[in-house]
Amino acid sequence: MRKLLFILLFIVTSFTHVVMSQARIPSSEEEKIVSEAIQEQLKNENTKVSISVYDNQLYVTNATEHSIVEVKNMLGETILTFQITSSRDVFNLNLKKGFYIIRVDEILQRIIIK
């Protein structure tokens, strides 16, 4: 039994050594590229445009200044248009109950006015 366990342990350690010797260690340039990509992704997630509606008011955060906000009905007709002036804007909608589409840059979001 001990002999079998010893042989099994030898095979596992040999296999691990072969795998580790074949593993490629990334260069500092590759690490730099990966690090920059991760930082860019985190930056984009932190600055993601947020659109929400509460009490017939539209809240837009993290949008680019001077971006255009369009409010459309379900037929695609533009009902209201606003321009973003700061990173956190609030717009009074005064809309009837129903479904609407909000567009800010490439972001589209469906909202419900109750």
Image: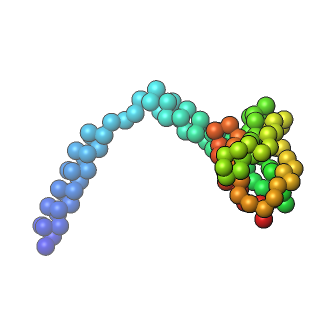
Q: Is residue 104 left or right of residue 37?
A: right
Look at the image and name its color scheme.
rainbow
Whether residue 41 appears in this view of the structure is: yes
The front one of 13 and 40 is 40
Image quadrant in which you'd find residue 68? top right
18 lies above or below 9: above
Q: Quadrant of the N terminus?
A: bottom left
Q: Is residue 79 above or below residue 24?
A: below
| Residue 87 visible, this angle | no
Count of labels in the image = 0
Residue toward you, 15 or 10 = 15
Is the residue 25 above or below the residue 46 in the image? above
Q: Quadrant of residue 44?
A: top right
Would you say 22 lies left or right of 26 here? left
User: Residue 78 location in percent, x, y?
Assistant: 74, 42
90 left or right, relative to 8:
right
Q: Residue at x 74, y 60 (%)?
A: 98
Residue 87 point in image, percent of width and height? 80, 39
Residue drawn 18% across the image and 56% down it? 10
Where in the figure is residue 91, as x and y percent of width and height?
Answer: 85, 47
Residue at image position (55%, 39%) is: 38
Q: Nearer the viewer, residue 104 or 96?
A: 96
Q: Position of residue 53 (x, y in %)?
A: 78, 56
